[in-house]
Structures are given as structure tokens and as C-alpha cells.
Image (cartoon, grey):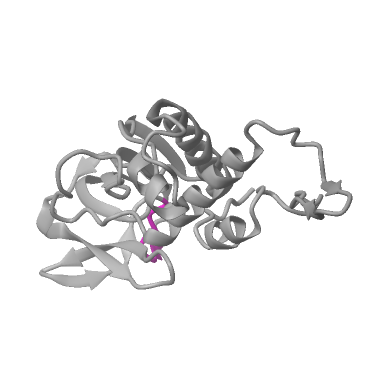
Amino acid sequence: MSLVVITRATATALTTPANVRSDLGLAADSPSDDQLRRFIDQASETAATYCRRIFGRQTMREHFDLCRRGTWCAEPLLSGAPVNSVASVSLDGTVLDPSGYRLDEEPADPISLFYLRLLHSGTPILWRGRSAAVEYKTGWFLPSDSGSAPAGVPLLPAAVERAVILLVGVALSGSGRDIMIKSEQTEGVGQTDYYVQGTSAALPHPEAESILSAYRRVMFA
């Protein structure tokens, strides 16, 4: 199996300055939108790297090694999810008519599984061939996308946006202070302790890591 990106996502920011201000209770002009966008870009990239996926919409081409010695085999599971639409399917180099296959969604929490069923007279059958190639569109409509979501394109899960906003909050809290300080104490006034990312933590905010862990792509060697 191999996966090739044909058209990369044009939007990658998983939230907006306005949403960050609203959720974190920030003032309308402090910090600036430019600074917030920097933090959003950094947090969005962190989330994408941790989850091993691109959340924005893109076009993929996936190749599958199917059956050996002419035997029948089960339908391929597409790696990209959610799948918005399938543009073309070829079997052993021959492009199939759209009536010869069907995209089936199997609900799962939080991301459904998408299988490509081979059809004969409208009835699903096992695949037979050595290789298949599928070109399809995948991804979510992001808060930073303009306009409204096209048909068949789901909105980015609210939980993912929340995780990114939490990561932006961590960046904001560390701005302007020595991030190496774990605790501050003022005699007669009080003491403040700061969260310190542990060696076993992958992200600087535990709730954000808990949320995003459900969206991580499983990688096989």
C-alpha cells in the first residue's frame, strides 16, 4: 500500500483568533491577531504532527496490493478519513465505471472507517486482481476555511478545535515569562506553581493530549 498527496490542503489552521479570544476570554486587541495566528499555526502543526494526519481537505491517491495467485480478497480500507468523495478507481490498470464500486462508511468513534466495495449488478462482491488505485478527497472543513462547507465535507470536530485552543493557551501563558520557572513564591503573599510537561507527556497540555489521542492515525511498520 502507498499513499500519495495529489493536492495539498490550502487551509491548515484548526481555529481562528476570534474563537481563541472567545474561549480564553482574551481582550479584543491584546494580544494582536498576528500574534494569535502565529500561536494557532504552531498549535495546529503540533496537533497534526501528533495525530499523524492532515485535518484540512486534500486529494489523495492510494495504491493497494490486493490478491496473490488470482485469489479473491476482501475490500480495501482507505487510509484517509473522513472520505468526502471518490474520483476514480482502477483495478489492474483498468479504470472502473462508477457503477462498479461503492464507498461504504462504517461508523466508529471518533472517525468512521471507509471501505471500497466492488459491485456486480449492484451487489457487493470480493475483489479479484493484483492491485487497485483509488483517487479520493479527504479531510474536514476547517474554522479557517472561507465560505460554507461543500456537500459531503464534514466540519472539523469541535473537540479537535478545543484541543488546539488549549495549546494556544499554553503558548500564551508562557509568553513574557521564564518558561523554566516551575514555582514562584512571594513572602506573605502566596505561591504559584506552573504545570511542567512530564517526560511521558507528548503535548504540553494534558487535556489537549487526551482529546487528540483519539484522532491519531495508527501506523504500521
Residue drawn 51% across the image and 37% down it: 45
Residue drawn 32% across the image and 35% down it: 11
Residue in front for this viewpoint, 176 or 89: 176
Q: Quadrant of residue 111?
A: bottom left
Task: Evaluate whether residue 38 shows in this view.
Answer: yes
The magenta segment is 71-79
Residue 119 point in image, percent of width and height: 19, 65
Task: Evaluate whether residue 69 shows in this view.
Answer: no
Residue in front for this viewpoint, 11 or 25: 25
Left or right: 219, with 110 as reference point: right
Residue 171 point in image, percent of width and height: 59, 39
Q: Residue furthest top?
A: 34
Residue 185 point in image, percent of width and height: 85, 48
Residue 217 point in image, percent of width and height: 52, 53
Residue drawn 58% across the image and 51% down it: 219
Residue in front for this viewpoint, 62 or 202: 202
Q: Is residue 108 above or below residue 151?
A: below
Query: Magenta span has 111?
Result: no
